[in-house]
Image (spheres, rainbow, N blue to C red):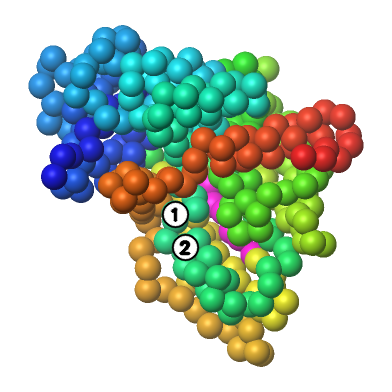
Amino acid sequence: MDKLTVAFIGTGRISDLHALAYLDDERADIVAVCDRNRELARMRGRQWGLPEERIFSDYHQLLALPDIDLVEILLPHHLHYQATLDAIAAGKHVSVQKPMALTIAEADAMVAAARDAGLILKVYENFIFYPPVQRAKSLIDNGEIGDPLTIRVKSNSGISPTEWTVPASARAWRLNPEECGGGPLVFDDGHHKFALGWHFMGKAEEVHAWIGRTEVEPGAYLDAPAIVSWKFPGNRFGSLEAVFSPELALDTAHYAQDDRIEITGSKGVIWVTRGHGKMMDVPPVVMYKDRQTRSFSDMPVGWEHSFINSSRHFIDAYFAGEPPQLTGEEGREVLRFALAAQESARSGRAVKL
Ligand SMILES: NC(=O)c1ccc[n+]([C@@H]2O[C@H](COP(=O)([O-])OP(=O)(O)OC[C@H]3O[C@@H](n4cnc5c(N)ncnc54)[C@H](O)[C@@H]3O)[C@@H](O)[C@H]2O)c1
């Protein structure tokens, strides 16, 4: 069997988790890496078993290699668009991290370029592959809580003595709206929450948002506290509350954040009680129906599993010749959702999609 050969452009913080499934799956190989920080590229390249000639600091050189099937783009957001077009022009399939671009016009051009070249364009979204989220989805798809009527996502950010090290450079571009495309919590991380809304409830038709500002460094702001509400077709609703508490200490192996989801159906309620971290000492999935509460704990809860499952899903889809989640078109819908929240916060009005 031919293997799926994968190259990474951007070997920053999150590349650790991206690489796990490719390193572990015998159907795929990581064959090249690039980061403009050459030392970082070299560190990852060595860690992943690559020879020196497969480690680059200019991604155009990497794209010139003939033996790459898929390029994983893990760059700051303002670079996603051009790097995707360059990779497609070089004949590579592309998996670009979320959000796929800063504007819908860019997203449209990326989708069109991939379609015209007959190549896959995938937007890397992992929250929908987090095992507790997958369990909640299969319970809902089995009709356990009836028709889903509302979704509530709550995201707490704080501080953590156990979090992984995030380089100052990774924080700096996120706090610069021109490079991030919006704020770190509602636009960057919010992409995942909008993807969850889409995953469980379908396309939203209207969005309203209040997005506050919390100064975390002189002149640099987190986009929190924030409340975003969504209207879905058929009298169904959703909301995201994102809040940063500067003295809230969280247990986590990754970011100092924890998320919870509550989905109410016509005959029951499901909670996903954890995400990056663990705030509540309860099972990861809890369901209430028929006057009884049931708990589900038979699944991995480490955050890394959302990445492993997302990449493994792509490898499966690639060899089956099926569309991956998210397709470029689906990523564009989630981006539209995220941009509408920003527009609503600016204008003070609900935005129709
Ligand atoms: N799915 C998730 O949960 C999740 C979590 C974190 C980050 N991400 C996404 O992953 C991407 C990367 O985030 P990160 O946290 O790893 O950031 P990071 O800043 O740690 O990594 C980005 C890397 O890109 C490199 N870079 C910048 N410009 C370059 C260029 N022109 N050529 C080559 N390399 C260049 C930087 O040196 C850096 O190492 C972003 O799109 C982000 O939204 C997703």
SS class of the residue under badge 1? Answer: helix
- Residue 99 showing in the rendered view: yes
Q: Residue at x 34, y 46 (%)?
A: 321
Q: Camera-side residue: 173 or 78?
A: 78
- N-terminal of the pair, mark 1 or mark 2, is 1
Q: Amino acid at mark 2?
A: Gln
Residue 147 at what x, y percent from top left?
69, 72
Main SS, magenta region, reads strand
What residue is shown with label 2? 134
The quadrant of the image that shows the N terminus is top left
Q: Residue at x 32, y 10 (%)?
A: 60
Q: Is residue 97 above or below residue 54?
A: below
Q: Residue at x 54, y 52 (%)?
A: 258
Contact (CB < 8 A) between labels 1 and 2?
Answer: yes
Q: Is residue 205 left or right of residue 26?
A: right
Residue 284 at what x, y percent from top left?
48, 67
Residue 11 at what x, y percent from top left?
32, 26
Most extreme residue toward the bottom, as rendered?
A: 291
Q: Is residue 142 above or below residue 18?
A: below
Q: Camera-side residue: 35 or 245?
A: 35
Q: Is residue 229 left or right of residue 43?
A: right
Q: Camera-side residue: 29 or 259?
A: 29
Identify the image quadrant of residue 210. top right
The quadrant of the image that shows the C terminus is top right
Instruction: Tell me how far mark 1 sits from mark 2, CA to CA.
Output: 6 Å
Q: Is residue 316 magenta?
A: no
| Magenta span of residues | 257-262
Residue 345 at what x, y percent from top left?
81, 34
- Say few, some or many: other residues with alpha carbon within 10 Å of mark 2 (under 14 / 14 to 19 / 20 or more): some
Q: Is residue 349 left or right of residue 18?
A: right
SS class of the residue under badge 2? Answer: helix
What residue is shown with label 1? 129
